[in-house]
Image (cartoon, rainbow, N blue to C red):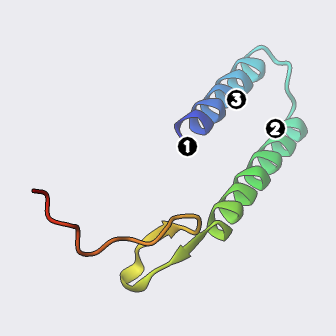
């Protein structure tokens, strides 16, 4: 998730630099904002579909195996 946030931050900084240079108009900025929001919404939806809820609100990936409750004693 950190890498995705860094890419987003880099995109925002690039957009600000283009705006400061007068190379981006309002319509382009709005289109970029919609594109970013759509991409983030898809990622959230994808992440939500790959996890399942457990009692107590805990989240665990659906690919995780069973959890061993009583570990064997170490001798």
> Real-space Cα distance between discs 1 and 3?
15 Å
**Horizontal arrangement in the rendering, residue 2 relative to residue 71 (left or right):** right
Choose mark 1 or mark 3, whichever is in front.
Answer: 1
> Real-space Cα distance between discs 2 and 3?
12 Å
Tell which circle, 2 or 3, labels the residue nearer the N-terminal end: 3
Return the residue at label 3. 11
**Which numbered tag is attached to residue 31?**
none
Residues at discs 1 and 3 in contact (Cβ within 8 Å): no
The vertical placement of 56 against 27, above or below, is: below
Q: Position of residue 43 (x, y in %)?
A: 70, 55
Q: Please tell me which residue is depicted at 71% across the width and 61% down the height of the picture.
A: 46
**Which numbered tag is attached to residue 1?**
1
Q: Position of residue 19 (x, y in %)?
A: 76, 23
The vertical placement of 33 against 62, above or below, is: above
**Horizontal arrangement in the rendering, residue 6 relative to residue 67 (left or right):** right
Tell which circle, 2 or 1, labels the residue nearer the N-terminal end: 1
Q: Position of residue 10 (x, y in %)?
A: 64, 25
User: Which quarter of the picture shows residue 48?
Assistant: bottom right
Q: Quadrant of the N terminus?
A: top right
């Amino acid at each position: 998730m950190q890498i995705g946030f860094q890419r987003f931050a880099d995109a925002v900084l690039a957009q600000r630099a283009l705006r400061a240079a007068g190379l981006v108009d309002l319509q382009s900025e709005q289109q970029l904002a919609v594109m970013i929001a759509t991409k983030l919404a898809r990622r959230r939806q994808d992440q939500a579909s790959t996890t399942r809820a457990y009692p107590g609100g805990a989240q665990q990936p659906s690919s995780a195996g069973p959890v061993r409750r009583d570990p064997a004693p170490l001798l």
